[in-house]
Image (tube, rainbow, N blue to C red):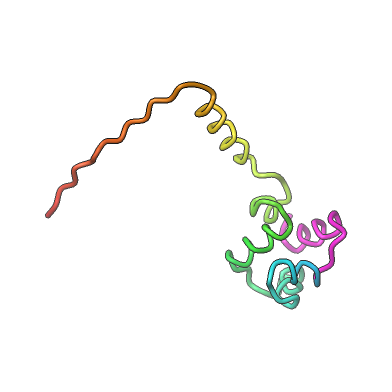
């Protein structure tokens, strides 16, 4: 899958138009339309804005599936905050030339 297929599908799922997405993301409708036709290059900052507006991860926007590593962060946090913790801070000496 690619953005030409995924973006229109996400819009359909949300009952949203390209114009509404443009307004919500702050991007030009022509830019978004260009993405769906493959005629406009994709900028990562713009991609982030669209993902935020659609409330999906960048991974899901690009690949059409949930980010497989998203839950990894949740599991790490759960483990960290499930009991007692010991945190150490050590100064690292660097060679100065």
Q: Does the stretch in magenta take in 12?
A: yes
Image coordinates of residue 71 in percent, x first then y, are 62, 36
Quarter of the figure with residue 48: bottom right
Image position of 66 (left or right of 20)? left
x 66%, y 51%: residue = 57
Question: x, y percentage for residue 93?
Answer: 19, 43
- Give above or below for 88 relative to 9: above
Residue 94 at what x, y percent from top left? 19, 46
Name the side, left or right, on which 19 lies relative to 46.
Answer: right
Query: Which residue extends farthest left?
Result: 97
Q: Which residues are magenta?
A: 1-18
Compared with 47, 23 (above or below) is: below
Residue at image coords 58%, 64%: 44
Give coordinates of residue 45: x percent, y percent: 58, 65
Q: Nearer the viewer, residue 10 or 6?
A: 10
Quarter of the image with the C terminus is: bottom left
Residue 87 located left or right of residue 46 = left
**Image point (58%, 35%), residue name:** 72
Residue 66 vertical placement versus 58 (above, below): above
User: How many numbered circles are shown?
Assistant: 0
Q: Residue 29 vs residue 43: left or right?
A: right
Which residue is situated farthest in the top direction here? 83
**Which residue is drawn at the image coordinates 67% and 58% (left, top)?**
52
Residue 60 lies in the magenta-colored region: no
Judged from this view, the residue extending furthest toward the front is: 84
Frontmost residue, 41 versus 95: 95
Quarter holding the N terminus?
A: bottom right
Q: What is the chief secondary structure element of the magenta stretch?
A: helix
């Amino acid at each position: 899958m690619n953005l030409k297929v995924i973006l229109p599908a996400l819009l359909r799922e949300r009952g949203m138009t390209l114009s509404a997405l443009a307004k919500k993301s702050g991007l030009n409708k022509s830019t978004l339309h260009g993405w769906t036709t493959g005629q406009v290059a994709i900028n990562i900052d713009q991609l982030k804005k669209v993902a935020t507006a659609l409330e999906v991860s960048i991974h899901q926007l690009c690949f059409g599936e949930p980010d497989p590593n998203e839950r990894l962060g949740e599991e790490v946090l759960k483990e960290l905050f499930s009991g007692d913790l010991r945190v150490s801070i050590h100064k690292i000496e660097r060679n100065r030339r």
